[in-house]
Image (spheres, rainbow, N blue to C red):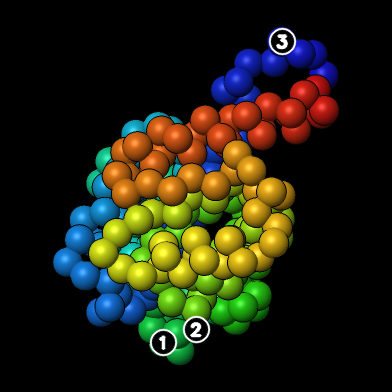
Amino acid sequence: MSAEIEKKHFPKIKICISGAADTSHCGDSAFGKAEELGRQIAERGAVLVDGATTGFPFWAAKGAKLAGGIVVGISPASSEKEHIEVYQLPIAYHDLIIYTGAGYSGRNLLLTRTADAVIEGCGRMGTINEFTIAFEDKKPIGILEGEWETDEVLKTLVEKSHRADEMKGKLVYEADPKTMIDKLLVVIEKYKADSEQRVL
């Protein structure tokens, strides 16, 4: 293929929002920050990918859809019926939900690998699982700082991993959603450019 192929013919950037389905421990600012993250992703023309769940990712999905964006959910369930009735998860604010039938741990793997980058918001064990998958895959990762403890936990994991050098230039720590997306898009574009050149 020609190197002159227009950028519009390439897939859109996909950003995964990872965070707690139960946000009771996250503090008052969590929903507002999640919604603003979604809005910023939509306004840049990127696709928001999430676990088709409640809580932090749901509010990010809502922000993206209200801004006219595209939201793709990756569900742990095998069907819409199971998604709603067994997992008790929402379908609102999504353009497409992929039903994996893989449970939560399998869904987490597929979710992170679908995206070009992962943003970690306020979360619990599942969020840490998604972080470690993205870390192992050396994907760009944004760690949203806030009144929750998740950002501090993830910083400690990186520091004590003895592998922080592997992620040099790929980790973004930021409290402001707009600035987070600004910084993360620069990182994504840098690492996507090399991959795209290899397939032209």
- The C terminus is located in which quarter? top right
Q: Secondary structure at mark 3?
A: loop
Under mark 1, the amino acid is Glu
Residue 30 as seen in the image, left or right of residue 7: left
Q: Name which residue lies at 49% across and 83% down.
A: 82
Label 1: few (<14), some (14–19) or many (≥20) C-alpha neighbours in 10 Å: few
**Image marks 2 and 1: residues in contact by CB distance under 8 Å:** yes
Q: How far separated are the C-alphas under marks 2 and 1?
A: 5 Å
Whole-angstrom CA distance, mark 3 to mark 2, is 46 Å
Judged from this view, the residue extending furthest toward the left is 28
Does the rendering let one see residue 112? yes
Please tell me whether mark 1 sits on a helix, a strand or a loop: helix
| Residue 35, percent from left and from top | 27, 53
| Along the viewing direction, whichever of 148 and 67 lies nearer the viewer | 148
Work out whether mark 3 precedes mark 2 in sequence or the reverse, and give the earlier one. Answer: 3
Residue at image point 69% right, 15% down: 5
Q: Is residue 171 above or below residue 127?
A: above
Could you classify mark 3 by the number of other residues whose Cα lies within 10 Å: few (under 14), some (14-19), or many (20 or more)? few
Q: Which mark is residue 4?
A: 3
The residue singled out by tag 2 in the image is: 82
Q: Position of residue 90 (x, y in %)?
A: 36, 72
Query: Which residue is denoted by mark 1 in the rendering?
Result: 85
